Image: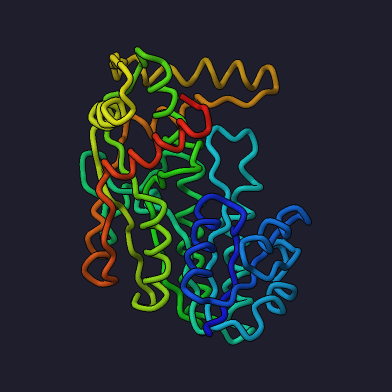
Amino acid sequence: MTSAFLTGGTGFVGGALLERLVAAGYQIRALARTPAGCSLLEDAGAAPILGDLSLVAPLTAAVEDCELVFHVAGVNEMCSRSPRAMFETNVTGTRNVVRAAAAAGARRVVFTSSAAALGERHGTVGDEDSEHRGRYLSQYERSKRVGEITAFTTGDRAGVEVVAVNPSSVHGPGRLGGSARLLLEALRAGRPWLVDSAVSFVDVADCSEGHLLAATRGRAGSRYVLNGASLHVGDLVAMMQEVAGVEVAPRMVPRWLARTAGFPAAWAANRLGRSTALCPEVVRTLLHGHRYDGSRAERELGLAYTAPQETVRRTVDWYRAEGLL
């Protein structure tokens, strides 16, 4: 039985991966920051370990005798008034996990990066070999790219294999954050305001399978984009409308107007000491749009993607079951 150490197991992506690993017969130790998180992990079939990403020595003890490490934990935050904590987790925490894996004698670290880390230029399709545009749309994007570079360089120096998976927006039952929240609100609004842009996503089940395949088939030092579909935002809303059986009549916000929308919202939030879901980096990300090519994972890992209509159907069914529509 293969033993593995998992971070981020109480989150959406990490929780789905934990379920997949347990089903595949892995013996899992999983990190949690709170006693409540430990209880969730234990119920899911893992041996919980109370701790965090801040120190290498406790992480090394946790990884001891584990062949694999799945480092999923990360902070995905936009419009942050103080992004330092996000960098501490996404960059410093990643360095600590890779160092701990090497010190404990683990064979491989599978690092959950992000397709945002590709930094593809506007109007191009991002893949593993995309040339970075040289600027960042958000602090989150910066933290994930720096975290990925840190994972690879630390692995090289410490002598442990690192493979990165770069999921696009992960959708499926249980997801309410990020672009999934925007799409749910579009269904509920009836006549939502949308930005003329592209949306890329991967089914949460495919994301989990991609992690598992990266552990067993991925090339050390490589990254694998996980992306099942890239659609115009209007086409995705139309697909959700058809599946949900609700009437949605989107209205497109002119791009020139969208460019200015985030500044007054961010200014007001800062003046009032509050958070906001709309700020310049959100607007930049929306206007940039993202189209990704996830075919390397198909060719090299053997990953088969779920049809986008099926992902939407499963998601809408979950919305209904939770009383969200």
Which residue is pictured at 39% across the width and 22% down the height? 186
Please state the horizontal and vertical placement of residue 82, each as a whole percent of the image: 65, 38
Q: Is residue 60 above or below residue 40?
A: below
- Return the residue found at the far right: 35
Question: Closest to the observer: 99 or 317?
Answer: 317
Please state the horizontal and vertical placement of residue 235, each as a whole percent of the image: 23, 30
- The quarter of the displayed image where residue 217 is located: bottom left
Whether residue 197 is visible to the viewer of this picture, yes or no, is no
- The quarter of the displayed image where residue 31 is located: bottom right
Whether residue 115 is visible to the viewer of this picture, yes or no, is yes
Give the tally of numbered discs. Answer: 0
Q: Is residue 13 above or below residue 26?
A: above
Q: Is residue 51 left or right of residue 20?
A: right
Q: Is residue 38 left or right of residue 263?
A: right
- The quarter of the displayed image where residue 57 is located: bottom right
Which residue is pictured at 30% across the width and 16% down the height? 247
Which residue is pictured at 49% across the width and 41% down the height? 175
Question: Closest to the observer: 44 or 265?
Answer: 44
